[in-house]
Image: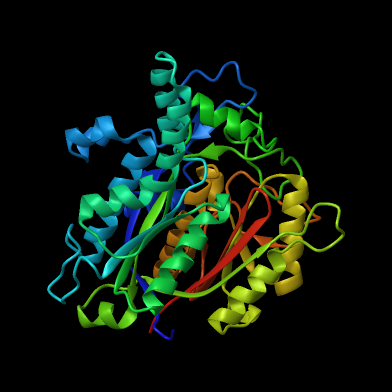
Amino acid sequence: MSARAVVTGIGVTAPNGLGTEQYWAATRRGDNAIGEVSRFTPDQYPARLAGEVRTFDAAAHLPGRLLPQTDRMTRLALVAADWALADAGLTPDGRTDAGIGEFDIGVVTASSSGGFEFGQNELQNLWSRGSQYVSAYQSFAWFYAVNTGQISIRNGLRGPSGTLVSDQAGGLDALAQARRQIRQGFRAMVSGAVDASICPWGWVAQLASGRLSTSDAPERAYLPFDAAAGGHVSGEGGALLIVEDADSARSRGARIYGEIAGYGTTFDPPPGSGHEPGLRRAIELALADAGVTPGDVDVVFADAAAVPELDRAESHALTAVFGPFGVPVTAPKTMTGRLYSGAGALDTVTALLAIRDGLVPHTTNVTPAAEHQIDLVVERPRTMPVRTCLVVGRGYGGFNSALVVRATD
C-alpha cells in the first residue's frame, strides 16, 4: 500500500474552456461562463441560469455511430477521457512501449445528477408506448454505468472499474478510489468525473434541493462567502485524469503534474443532533494521510456552496484547521457554476495547474462577508509558489471529502 499515485494526463470539458489549456487561460482571465439556459426554454422555472459547455460539438470529436447511443454527459466524458489518455501518452487501447496492457488500466468515475437527459428521452419514447416502468429502469442503469462502461469499451480498458455517487464530493472520492487501485498494484486509472443534467427532468430535480440561485444576473447569481449569497448556479462538465503509479510513470518518461497525496472523507451527523459537521474532520484526515501540517498547505480550493449556513460551516471548518485568514482560499467555480461530481475533479486539475504555474486563480464577482475569516482570493489571480493544495467537496445529504495534491520532486 506504499505506491505513490501521480497524475500524468488531464482532459477538461468545462463551461469556460474545452481542453486543459483553453480552460486554464479562461480561468486565469476570470471569464464568466454563466448565462441563461439554452438547452431548453427555462422561462417557467424560478432558476434560469447555468454554466453550459456551449461550444461543444460532439460530432467533431466522436464517431457518428456513438451519437445515437449516448447522451450529452457521456459524450463530454468520452472526449475528456480521449484527451486525458492522449495527454498521458497512452494509446486508446491502453498499451504503451513501457509494457502497460489493457488489464493494467481501469476506470473509476463519479456521477451525481448526470443521466437525467438519457432517462428523460427514454421516458418520452416509452410513455408513448405505455411502458414507463422499463424506461425508468433503463435510465437508472445508465446513470450508474455510463461513465465507466462507455470509457472502458471505447478504449479497450479491462482493469477494475466502478462509479461512485456522492454528489459534489464524488469527483474527489473517485480520485481517491483510483489511488487505492494504484496501491493495489494496477499501473494506471482513468478517474475523475463529468456531469451534465441541464434538461427539464434534471432541472426539476436540482430545484428540489432549494439551493439553486434564482438571480437572473450572471455576475450576481453565484456568490459564495458573500453577504448576498443566495444559492449556487448549476453547471455541466468536469475533468478526467490519468492516475498512474509513480514508478511506472517515471520508467516511461511521462510528464507528471503532481501527486494525489492524501484523502479524507466523513459524513455529517443528523440535523438537529447538535454535533459538529464533518468537514473539519475530513480535512484533518486528508492532511494526516498526506503527512503534512496545516502550515504546509499553500491554497485551499473551497466547496463554495453559496448557501449562507453552508458557507458559514465551511469557513468555520477552515478557520478551525488553519486559523483566521491562515491560508489563501479560492473558488474558481464561480466562473462555471457547480458541476456536481465534476466539480471536485475540475478543482483538482486547477490545483495541479496552480502548482505548475505558481498562480492561484481568483474567485470572481465576490466580496467576502466579514463573518468569514478566510483569505479569499478575489479580484485577480495571485502569483505565489504553490506546492501543496487542499481540495474540498461536500455533497447534498452530508458527504464531505478532502483531497491533498502536491508537487513531486
Q: Nearer the viewer, residue 306 or 181?
A: 181
- Up/down of 389 relative to 147, above or below: below
Q: Position of residue 371 (x, y in %)?
A: 81, 55
Q: Is residue 219 left or right of residue 91?
A: right
Question: Does the image show residue 39?
Answer: no
Q: Nearer the viewer, residue 366 or 215?
A: 215
Percent x, y of residue 339: 51, 45
Task: Let me know if residue 174 appears in the view.
Answer: yes
- Seen as rendered, the residue at the extreme left is 97
Which image quadrant: the C terminus? bottom left
Q: How is the image coloured?
A: rainbow
Quadrant placement of the N terminus:
bottom left
Quadrant location of residue 16? Answer: top left
Location of residue 203 (image quadrant): top right
Instruction: Pick whichever, 117 or 405, lies toward us.
Output: 117
Task: Using the rendered view, name the quadrant where residue 312 is placed.
Answer: bottom right
